[in-house]
Amino acid sequence: MGKIEEAIQQKEFKDPYNKLVVNLLYTNSYLVTSQNALFKPHDLSPEQYNVLRILRGQNGAPTTVSSIQDRMLNKMSNASRLVDKLKMKELVKREECPSDRRQVDVLITEKGLELLNQLEIQVEEANRNFVKLTKEEALQLNDLLDKLRG
Amino acid sequence: MGKIEEAIQQKEFKDPYNKLVVNLLYTNSYLVTSQNALFKPHDLSPEQYNVLRILRGQNGAPTTVSSIQDRMLNKMSNASRLVDKLKMKELVKREECPSDRRQVDVLITEKGLELLNQLEIQVEEANRNFVKLTKEEALQLNDLLDKLRG
DNA sequence: TACATTTGAATGTATATACATTTAATTCAT
DNA sequence: ATGAATTAAATGTATATACATTCAAATGTA
């Protein structure tokens, strides 16, 4: 695949910034497509997987829908509906928050934990394979991305 | 915003590769959200804008739907339906390909060109602002992304 | 030529994204 | 204490993504 110019057959870009935006969008698509293949057999989407990870990170403490939303990778997605889907698969459960009845406490179930633990090993292994960089380069790329967002 | 750990409130990652995958997904969301605000007033989605750019790149030569698909940033999206939407807005036109009636030639209209030229200046300017890096860093980041995909 | 295979595009369906709007509960201000 | 403002979550709607399937046209082969 190599250089972005070849990948999308565009000869040149206005400047390195505009090339970078295109390069990031394209690389994202590459990663998401690669990851999808992993999640597909388990009937899970990447964002559903991410929600399960957020919930497990709480170590059993309940998490409200809005707190999940804040921590999602995609800030504009709809945590309420994602939780709904996960609940239908019995991977999470919802409870009314006693201190504030507007809020809903969400918890990962035993079934959800099992699926997550099983999947995570594969995902971690696959991520190392998708990314064709040395450890040093990966660290450097992380720093540049953090700086990019300011 | 700064470091990804703070942004999504995750304390640590398995290794730099797995942190990088999350960082890329998150940075993509940052960029897409920023860009959306630009496209919104013109009733255009980022991918529709991208299709218009691909068509203009042909300098008047017709482009088939599958050729558009190949050059899109998101390889899994549906060029046929995107072209449909653009046609309804009269930004592109479709013609049956004389040499192969299975194929459809797509061309950008005068109206499409005008919108694109007007928008492009704003987009280029905005992209430089979204990316809080020096030119050198942007070049470096481009190289790392190209290498990442192998 | 006849028939199977392949190809380009369209269509069907489920999920997700991006917002706007709604509803109920809580908090704030007077 | 009452009504206004705010907040949390759910819901509505349009578009996009991810695939599978369909359909017609073109190609390949016996």
Image (cartoon, coloured by chain):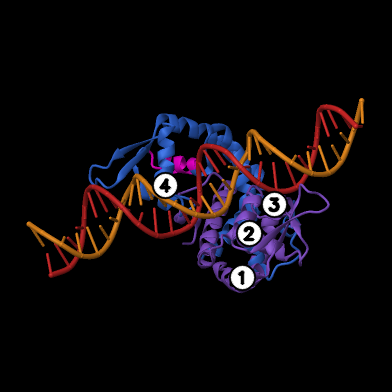
Chain colours: A blue, B purple, C red, D orange
In the rendered image, residue A67, in percent from the top left (x then y), is placed at 37, 49
Residue A58 falls inside the magenta stretch: yes
Q: Which of B27 and B74 lies nearest the eye of the viewer?
A: B74
| Eye-nearest disc, 2 or 4 | 2
Quote the CA–CA distance across marks 2 and 3.
Answer: 16 Å
Earlier residue among tags 2 and 3? 3
Amino acid type assigned to the residue bearing label 1 in the image: Leu
User: In the rendered structure, which segment of residues is drawn in magenta?
Assistant: A48-59
Q: Secondary structure at mark 1?
A: helix
Mark 3 lies on a secondary structure that is: helix
Which one is in front in this view, the residue at disc 1 or the one at disc 2?
Answer: 2
Q: Is residue B21 visible?
A: yes
Left-right relation of A34 to D8: right
Tell me whether marks 1 and 3 sit on the same chain: yes
Residue drawn at x 46%, y 41% is A53
Q: Which residue is mark 4?
A: A79
Question: Disc 1 marks which residue?
Answer: B115
Looking at the image, which is closer to me, A137 or A84? A84
